[in-house]
Amino acid sequence: MKYAVVIERGPTSYGASVPDLPGCIAVGHTRDEAEQLIQEAIGAHLAGLRAEGLTAPEPLTQVTTVEV
């Protein structure tokens, strides 16, 4: 499955979150690190859901960009 990931640049780090997996977040010093960490976090989040006997939610969030 492919989940949409939101990456935000802060003053000293990058934060990443997954809208379809509430609570699944990661923070890295660089964008690349945040992407790597959120990929690991998604895997851990889904494994935790399976361990609890829950089904992983289907990805519903769609992403686009708009030029203004």
Image (cartoon, helix red, strand yellow):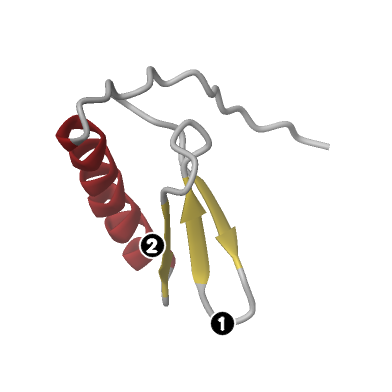
x, y percentage for residue 27? 43, 67
For mark 2, what is the residue? 34
Q: Which of 66 and 61 is in front in this view?
A: 61
Residue 42, above or below 54: below
Q: Residue at x 48, y 31 (%)?
A: 20
- Name the secondary structure under disc 2: helix
Quadrant for the C terminus, please.
Answer: top right
Which badge, 1 or 2, is on the more N-terminal residue?
Answer: 1
The percent position of residue 47, horizontal first and vertical second, equals 18, 39
Closer to the camera in the image, 44 or 48? 48
Residue count near mark 1 (Cα–Cα under 10 Å), binned few <14, some 14–19, many ≥20: few
Residue 52 picture quarter: top left
Residue flagged by tag 1: what amino acid is it? Thr
Disc 1 and disc 2 in contact, CB within 8 angstroms: no
From the image, which quarter does the N terminus lie in? top left
The outermost residue toward the bottom is 12
Local SS, label 1:
loop
| Relative side of 43 to 22, left or right | left
> Is the residue 64 above or below the residue 37 in the image?
above
Residue 3 quadrant: top left
Q: How far apart are marks 1 and 2 (CA)?
A: 12 Å
Instruction: Work out whether 35 lies above or below 20.
Output: below
Residue that badge 1 annotates: 12
Q: Residue furthest right?
A: 68
List x then y, in percent, for residue 34: 38, 62
Q: What is the quadrant of residue 58 in the picture? A: top left
Q: Position of residue 48 (x, y in %)?
A: 22, 42
User: Which residue appears at 29% of the width and 52% of the height?
Assistant: 41
Looking at the rendered structure, which numbered label has been put on residue 38?
none
Is 26 displayed left or right of 13 in the figure? Answer: left
Closest to the observer, 39 or 55: 55
What amino acid is labelled 2 in the image?
Ala
